[in-house]
Each structure stands twice: as structure tokens, then as C-alpha cells.
Image (cartoon, helix red, strand yellow):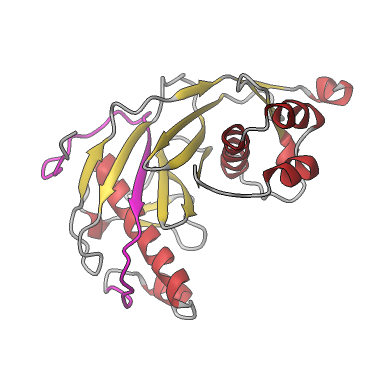
Amino acid sequence: MAGQSNDSNPEPARASISVWLGRQPLEPYDFPDWLGEYEREVASGMATGRLMEYVHSRWLIRQGLYGVSGRPPHLCQPVHGRPVVSAEPEGWFLSLSHSHGMSACAISSHTGIGVDIEPVFRDSSWRKIARRWFTPAEQDWLLSQSSQEAFLKVWTLKEAWLKATRRGIAGNLRTLEVTANLELTGDRPGENWHAALTEAEGFMIAVVWQDESAEAAPELHLVHNNDEAHMRPAELERLGEQPWVICPVKQLSPAQEARA
């Protein structure tokens, strides 16, 4: 699919959910001059590998905000601290994920957004993780299928859910239960949650988002690296042919949860 230069980027529908993927550069680099004072302070004590991941993620956030708003990347930035909201332009909610040299940034015009990526080639002791952290029902079907791919789907959905609901892993992995046919049961009744899965660029990608409208699927983009020492608009490729699996989400009321 041909890339889009975005010299004149059209204003998108504000309710859209988008995911922006970018590979970290192989060569280390120093602090680029477009990093804000707060970002430079945070990055100052980082080792080279962590520094590259940090700078690349801030570059990707700016390119993603450029993609959804049309504002030049050097005028875009996240809020200080954990980058869950945009500072410029205002009104966008953010979620980040990093894994094995790939970064992902999910952007929504509504609060409640989470993304997680994991390499499909990941060789992990997934059975041990499932037995310790997943629900009994999840363990039953995952261990019977003995499929690492199935485990990755459950893991990424849970991670994206926890990011979207602003919670950490500790004690919270069972707040979302995933069935063998990828139907989800969460613990947030009365809220409009949606979830989707796909594979792209060798990674499993899960997105969970909150929206009154039921979007068919997020938009997926690949951000091609330019010289990240400069804040030029990158080439943004729409991965429009990438299929998404939509995962139905239901919620347990407190009474139902007590009986479960």
C-alpha cells in the first residue's frame, strides 16, 4: 500500500480510534532539540537503550497527533508525566506500548483508551503465567488448547484493558475475563467499552477503548522513520487491509460479580 505524505492532512472524524506503529532506530542518538524541558529532565539519567525507547515514543506521539489533527509534529506534545493526554493540541487521549524495538501509540478523542503489543514470536513460559494470574475459566481453555498465540491474545487484551481503565497489573489481571471465542467480561458496568485484536508487522496488537458509538475497528497506521533528531512530518502509511477481530465486551454488575 502506498504511503501518505500528509502534506495536507484532512481533519478526521473526532470519534475515530487510531493506532500508530513505529520501529525504533537501530543507531543510538543524543537528546533531540525538540524534546521539552520536562522530557529532557526525565531522560537525562536513562541508559542508552531506555533513552532510545523513550525518545522514540515521544517522537511517535507527536507524529500520531499530527496524523489525527493535521498540526505539524513540532507543535504537538503530550502532558508532563505519564503521557495519557495531549497537551498540544488539546482533546486527545493517549496510550503507549513498547516491545522488542516496536512502539505503539493509540489515540482517541474519548477518555478510556489502552493499547498493548507483543511479538508473535515471543517464547515465554506462558503456562506458568496463566496458572498464576488468569481466572480458572481462562486456565481451563488456554491449557487445553496449548496455544501460545491464544495466550498472547488474552495477555494483550488484559494489558490494554488495564491501561484503558488506568490500573496496573498487580492484583488486576482478573478484572477482565476472556473466553475461548474472545468474548470479554469486565468489571466496569454502565460504561461503553469496545475491544479489538489484530496482527501486523510481526506483533499481536490489542486495543480497548471507551465510546458511546460502536466503531467497527480502529485505524491502523505504520509511521516510517525519518531522521528522528529532527521533528519533520513522517510518512504515515494506512494499513487499511489489516483485518481486526472485534471482541464483544460485557460487564458484570456488583451482584453478578459476587455470584461469579
Residue 149: tell me if it is visible: yes
Q: Residue at x 43, y 65 (%)?
A: 54
In the image, residue 68 sits, relative to residue 142, either above or below, namely: below
Q: Is residue 120 magenta?
A: no
Residue 147 falls left or right of residue 102? right
Residue 215, quarter of picture: top left
> In the rendered view, does 128 fall on the left or right side of 248?
right
- Residue 109 seen in the current view: no
**Residue 211 at x, y = what percent?**
49, 26
The residue nearer to you, when weighing 242 against 112, is: 242
Magenta residues, as a range? Answer: 4-32
The quadrant of the picture occupied by the N terminus is top left
Q: Main secondary structure of the magenta part?
A: loop
Quadrant in which the C terminus is drawn: top right
Q: 48 and 128: which one is in front?
A: 128
Q: Quadrant of residue 131?
A: top right
At 67% across and 50% down in the image, what residue appears?
168
**Residue 118, how many percent across, how many down?**
51, 46
Q: Is residue 20 magenta?
A: yes
In this rendering, the answer to whether 156 lies above or below 36 is: above
